[in-house]
Image (spheres, rainbow, N blue to C red):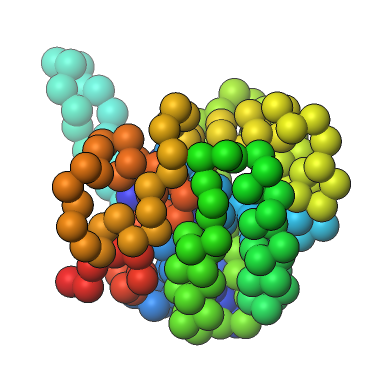
Amino acid sequence: MPNSSYLCATDLHSLYPSTTDKGFNAATDVVAYDVRCVPLLWLAMFREADLVTQTIVIAPDPDAVYYEFGPDGDFVEIATPADESQDQAVEAVAPIAAKARALAQLDAAVPVLDRLFPEGPLDEHAAMLHRAVAAAPGAYLTIELDEIEAMWEPDTFQPALRAALAGFAAPGDPKADRARLVELAQLREGRPFPSALALLGDQSGVEDDDYWNLVRLLGAGFSAAVPWEPAA
């Protein structure tokens, strides 16, 4: 899906496992995903030291079809452009951590988040995410977030991400720390956070902003089941 972020488990200490890990299976290895943001509690699993820079080699897509405007103003299919027929090396920066470390950091971040977000508490939400990550295969946890970074103005996303992750270990100005997390997670402010069980029982009284914020806290199921959503 375009403009999405993906919380991924992998046995390789590698960013973007959907590209770099030949054994990657999206049906089991994408823990959750979200659109146009990076969910708050995903961020809470990482620290600034977990940010890694890695060169990712992207192979050409043999099924890609390319078009251009023809003389009559219509799109016409063209041969694969030369620069799209060769491997492309891209420098990526994203967080990655051993799964046990990520889960310990999630637990440690909850009190920090509860101080920043009186809309909480977030203990039950963190416990739900803990269960989903623990159930996923793979020794490492990472976030594929290049599609989100591409939505930001150039050279603005990575500084915001780095500062947000640094704030879990060394909190600074509470307003600034909160504002960075709200922007990255695209939370809607102004009402208490929904219960972690909001989708699992009687949903009367659950409004659009509650559904929105629940996903911005935890993400949504991709293929594998997640404990905060009803079983298919």
Residue 151 placement, left or right of 114? left
Q: Is residue 13 above or below residue 176?
A: below
Q: Is residue 129 above or below residue 177?
A: below
User: Which residue is found at the position 66% from the left and 66% from the top?
Assistant: 107
Would you say residue 84 is visible in this rendering? Answer: no
User: Which residue is found at the position 72% from the left and 28% from the top?
Assistant: 176
Residue 44 placement, left or right of 69? right
Q: Position of residue 184 (x, y in %)?
A: 56, 37
Foreground of the two, 221 or 92: 221
User: Which residue is found at the position 66% from the left and 39% from the top?
Assistant: 116
- Tell me the quarter of the picture where residue 41 sits: bottom right
User: Which residue is found at the position 44% from the left and 39% from the top?
Assistant: 192
Would you say residue 36 is visible in this rendering? Answer: yes
Q: Position of residue 74 (x, y in %)?
A: 15, 22
Q: Position of residue 45 (x, y in %)?
A: 65, 61
Q: Is residue 106 above or below residue 69?
A: below
* Count of numbered circles in the view: 0
- Tell me the quarter of the picture where residue 14 sits: bottom right
Q: Is residue 23 above or below residue 231?
A: below
Foreground of the two, 129 or 83: 129
Foreground of the two, 65 or 32: 32
Q: Position of residue 208 (x, y in %)?
A: 26, 36
Residue 212 placement, left or right of 10? left
User: The C terminus lies in which quarter of the figure?
Assistant: bottom left
